Image (tube, grey):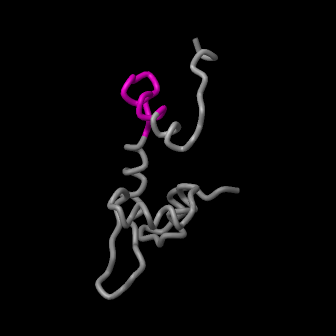
Amino acid sequence: MARQPNDYPPIMDTSMVGELLQMSPVHVRRLAREGVIPAYRIEGVRAFKFKRDEVLSWFEGQRVDLTNAADITLLENQMAAAGVIIDTDDYA
């Protein structure tokens, strides 16, 4: 059975955040280095630490509203940059 968000400790490491968000720890570290996801680094320690509640709040803010033309355009641009081809005639 999958773990629930509250099953994770209040302070998490990169692998725990990856498991919670179902993404690789490498991607979590990249997001942390780029300042995209809220993260902490203790002086003298290389590893990132994350507050569970901040990660969940950040995640909730990432929702894409596909009724919003700007979000649709952003999603289409991201997919195009990733090499995904969409035939919009299929959706007309």
In the image, residue 90 above or below residue 48: above
In the image, residue 15 above or below residue 31: below
x 44%, y 22%: residue: 67
In the image, residue 26 above or below residue 87: below
Q: Position of residue 52 (x, y in %)?
A: 42, 62
Which sits in the foreground, 1 or 46?
46
Which sits in the foreground, 56 or 75?
75
Q: Residue furthest bottom?
A: 44
Q: Residue furthest left?
A: 43
Q: Position of residue 39 (x, y in %)?
A: 35, 66
Quadrant location of the C terminus?
top right
Question: Which residues make up the magenta segment?
Answer: 63-76
x 54%, y 62%: residue: 18
x 39%, y 24%: residue: 68
Quadrant location of the N terminus?
bottom right
Q: Position of residue 85 (x, y in %)?
A: 60, 32
Which sits in the foreground, 31 or 41?
31
Does the magenta portion include 69? yes
Which sits in the foreground, 55 or 27?
27
x 37%, y 85%: residue: 45
In the image, residue 89 above or below residue 41: above
The image quadrant of residue 74 is top left
